[in-house]
Amino acid sequence: MNAPHHERQFLLRNDRAEVDGAIEALAGLWVELGLEPDVEADLNIAVEEMLTNVVRHGKVSGDGEAIRVQVWVTPAEARIEIEDRGEPFNPTEYPPPNIHATLEERKPGGLGILMVRKMMDETRYERRDGWNCFLMVRKLDR
């Protein structure tokens, strides 16, 4: 990575087009910082998955800036926190899907969250002042 420490913040409306714009901006940031392609891919997939879940399922109300994305990148790691004013939901406690079940037996959902938890080195959730706060950390020197 070229920079010793980098921070970025995005404020989004609860809209799929906003998610696409944030992913595009972050992809540019990863290239600017010289991250490895596998790290870029993990970060892009994880952010897109979690933001898409907020937009689809979070029941975020209001037309204003209802989702915040904060990014901190150091030579050792990338930390991304996604905050939304939707209903309380802790992705770290969401039960993993039974990938061995037949298609008829499987319940919909959960694969994206499972994938994010496997790609990231750390995931944490807390509810703060009416906001869902989901932190993802990806080590850059794996």
Image (cartoon, helix red, strand yellow):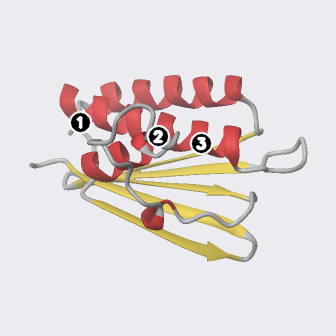
Whole-percent x, y for residue 72 in the image: 41, 54
Determine the residue positioned at 79% across, 50% down: 60
Task: Decide: few, some or many residues near mark 1? Use Cα within 10 Å; few <14, some 14-19, many ≥20.
Answer: some
Q: Earlier in the sequence, mark 2 or mark 3?
A: 2
Gap in Å between the C-alphas at discs 1 and 2? 12 Å
- Give the tally of numbered discs: 3
Q: Can residue 97 be seen in this view?
A: yes
Q: Name the residue under label 1.
A: 39
User: Do the numbered discs 1 and 2 sit on residues whose CB atoms are within 8 Å?
Assistant: no
Q: Which of marks 3 and 1 is nearer the N terminus?
A: 1
Determine the residue positioned at 24% across, 57% down: 121
Gap in Å between the C-alphas at discs 2 and 3? 10 Å
Q: Nearer the viewer, mark 3 or mark 1?
A: 3
Whole-percent x, y for residue 108 in the image: 52, 39
Determine the residue positioned at 49% across, 59% down: 91
Q: Name the residue under label 2.
A: 47
- Name which residue type carries label 2: Val
Whole-percent x, y for residue 44 in the image: 40, 32
Whole-percent x, y for residue 54 in the image: 64, 46
Q: What element carries label 2?
A: helix
Task: Decide: few, some or many residues near mark 2? Use Cα within 10 Å; few <14, some 14-19, many ≥20.
Answer: many
Compared to residue 100, the image places residue 120 above or below, namely below
Q: Earlier in the sequence, mark 1 or mark 2?
A: 1
Gap in Å between the C-alphas at discs 3 and 1? 21 Å
Q: Quadrant of residue 119?
A: top left
Q: Mark 3 points at which residue?
A: 53
Determine the residue positioned at 75% across, 31% down: 15
Judge left or right: residue 16 versus residue 109.
right
Q: Can residue 4 be seen in this view?
A: no
User: Do the numbered discs 2 and 3 sit on residues whose CB atoms are within 8 Å?
Assistant: no
